[in-house]
Amino acid sequence: MEYTLNELIAEWKMRKGLVPLRVDAAVTRHDAFEIDEYAARVIREWYEELLDTADVSLLDVEDITERVDIEDFSDGVAVMRLPDGCRRLVEVTMEQWRCPATIVTDPDSELALRQRSVFGRGGACCPVAVTEGAGRVRLYSFRGAVTPSPVRVLGVMSQPEGVIRCSPRALSLLFNS
């Protein structure tokens, strides 16, 4: 579902009991901050954290297959460039693989390091995709000299300023904090 920042600010203020204001009383405030700006900061921080760490069922996952490029391919390893704004890789399936790759976000993990050896790689049955930062993903492993092509690549993408895309269930994480 898609929300605007202003919609979520209004909802946040209502759920925190800040609106509607009473009309039968006079109130003088001596706040040191603008409540809408405060709510916007809380919501932006929550959304950034949500995009990077939340369960993918709470996020709007996009098919980015047509927007990825294979930059390099040699010795059974391909390097894929993700589109700008890709925050998180969710699924990678390549033409020669029998199943989606296991995605590894730590290049120094045991599974990632094992891929450096031709004998330790998972191959077509247990492929591995290691994210390297800067929008690059190293894909293990392939046979033959034909450059591999993606069948399905899913990712979590950044949205334009002021637009928040997530499951309605994700909002409970914001409003209950």
Image (cartoon, rainbow, N blue to C red):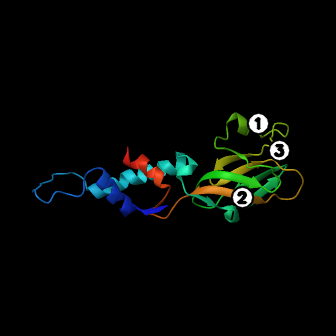
User: Which amino acid lies under the numbered mark 1 shown in the image of this protein?
Assistant: Arg
| SS for dot 1 | helix
| SS for dot 3 | loop
| SS for dot 2 | strand
| Image quarter in which the C terminus is found | top left
Q: Residue 124 carries which label?
A: none
Residue sitting at x 43%, y 46%: 173
Q: Alpha-carbon distance for marks 1 and 3?
A: 12 Å
Residue 79 percent across, percent down from the top left: 74, 53
In front: mark 2 or mark 3? 2
> Looking at the image, is mark 2 or mark 3 earlier in the sequence?
3
In front: mark 1 or mark 3? 3
Residue sitting at x 38%, y 58%: 8
Give the residue pinned by disc 2.
152
Residue 142 percent across, percent down from the top left: 84, 50
Q: Nearer the viewer, residue 28 or 171?
A: 171
**Mark 3 Cα-neighbour bin, 10 Å: few <14, some 14–19, many ≥20:** many
Whether residue 163 is visible here, answered yes or no, is no
Q: Which mark is residue 114?
A: 1
Residue 94 percent across, percent down from the top left: 77, 55
**Mark 2 Cα-neighbour bin, 10 Å: few <14, some 14–19, many ≥20:** some
Q: How many labels does the image show?
A: 3
Do the CB atoms of the residues marked 1 and 2 lie less than 8 Å apart?
Answer: no
Residue 39 percent across, percent down from the top left: 33, 54
Q: Nearer the viewer, residue 40 or 17?
A: 17
> Looking at the image, is mark 1 or mark 3 earlier in the sequence?
1
User: Which amino acid lies under the numbered mark 3 shown in the image of this protein?
Assistant: Gly
Whether residue 103 is visible here, answered yes or no, is yes
> Looking at the image, is mark 1 or mark 2 earlier in the sequence?
1
Give the residue pinned by disc 3.
123
